[in-house]
Image (spheres, rainbow, N blue to C red):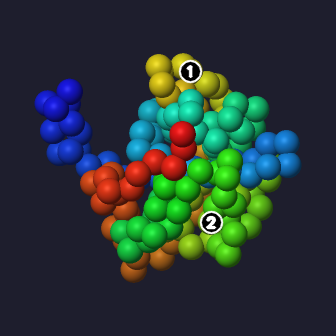
């Protein structure tokens, strides 16, 4: 798959932190597979790994919050990508507020939106969560650009 890796390296899409809450727990993870998938109605899809703690909560959650990070927020991306949520509280010492369905909203994110989970689709080792975006928040234009997939290639996934 080296040829496909070369193809995706040229695209260098934004990376997202996705958060959710269910059954009194909260979770969040770094997501490399996500994007707008419909113009009318506006829809967004997020793919979560089946071995990820966030996926386990998202299976029964009603809402996901999707965050874009500023390129200078690599350490925040590392926290959500390299730590396992089953063993660490990724939200400790972070500024966040409770969003729809109890999902954490990261205060310092470049931009975010809450998305009602419309449907789920099995895609292999990842499951797609089809979202209806709502409560969209974008930061001031003096920040950016967004952290990209290429910026985070050195982060080793924290899940098993």
**Residue at (67%, 75%) from the top-left corner?**
93
Quadrant assignment for the N terminus: top left
Q: Secondary structure at mark 1?
A: strand
Quarter location, residue 9? top left
Left or right, 40 with respect to 146, comes to right
On the image, the x and y values in percent for residue 7 come to 17, 36
Please rate how many residues cluster around mark 2, counting C-alpha atoms within 10 Å: few if below 14, some from 14 to 19, many from 20: many
Q: Are marks 2 and 1 in contact (CB under 8 Å)?
A: no
Quarter location, residue 73? bottom left
Q: Is residue 73 among what the camera can see?
A: yes
Left or right, 81 with respect to 134, comes to left
Up the image or down, 100 lies above or below 145; here it is: above
Up the image or down, 160 lies above or below 88; here it is: above
**Residue at (47%, 20%) from the top-left corner?**
124
Up the image or down, 11 lies above or below 94; here it is: above
Going by the picture, which residue comes out furthest to the right?
24
On the image, the x and y values in percent for residue 98 come to 77, 61
On the image, the x and y values in percent for residue 35 come to 43, 41
Please rate how many residues cluster around mark 1, counting C-alpha atoms within 10 Å: few if below 14, some from 14 to 19, many from 20: few
Q: Residue 121 got which mark?
A: 1
Quadrant assignment for the C terminus: top right
Between 134 and 14, the one lying in front of the other is 14
Q: Residue 106 got which mark?
A: 2
**Residue at (17%, 45%) from the top-left corner?**
10
On the image, the x and y values in percent for residue 127 come to 54, 27
- Give the mark nearer the N terminus: 2 vs 1: 2
Q: Residue 52 got which mark?
A: none
Up the image or down, 6 lies above or below 114; here it is: above
């Amino acid at each position: 798959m080296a040829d496909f890796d070369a193809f995706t390296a040229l695209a260098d899409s934004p990376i997202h932190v996705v958060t959710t809450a269910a059954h009194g727990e909260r979770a969040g993870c770094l997501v490399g597979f996500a994007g707008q998938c419909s113009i009318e109605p506006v829809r967004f899809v997020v793919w979560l790994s089946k071995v990820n703690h966030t996926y386990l909560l998202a299976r029964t959650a009603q809402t996901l919050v999707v965050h874009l990070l500023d390129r200078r927020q690599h350490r925040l991306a590392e926290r959500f990508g390299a730590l396992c949520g089953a063993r660490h509280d990724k939200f400790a010492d972070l500024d966040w507020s409770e969003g729809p369905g109890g999902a954490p909203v990261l205060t310092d994110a470049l931009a975010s939106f809450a998305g009602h989970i419309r449907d789920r689709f099995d895609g292999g080792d990842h499951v797609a969560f089809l979202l209806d975006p709502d409560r969209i928040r974008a930061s001031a234009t003096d920040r950016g650009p967004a952290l990209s997939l290429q910026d985070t290639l050195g982060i080793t996934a924290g899940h098993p």
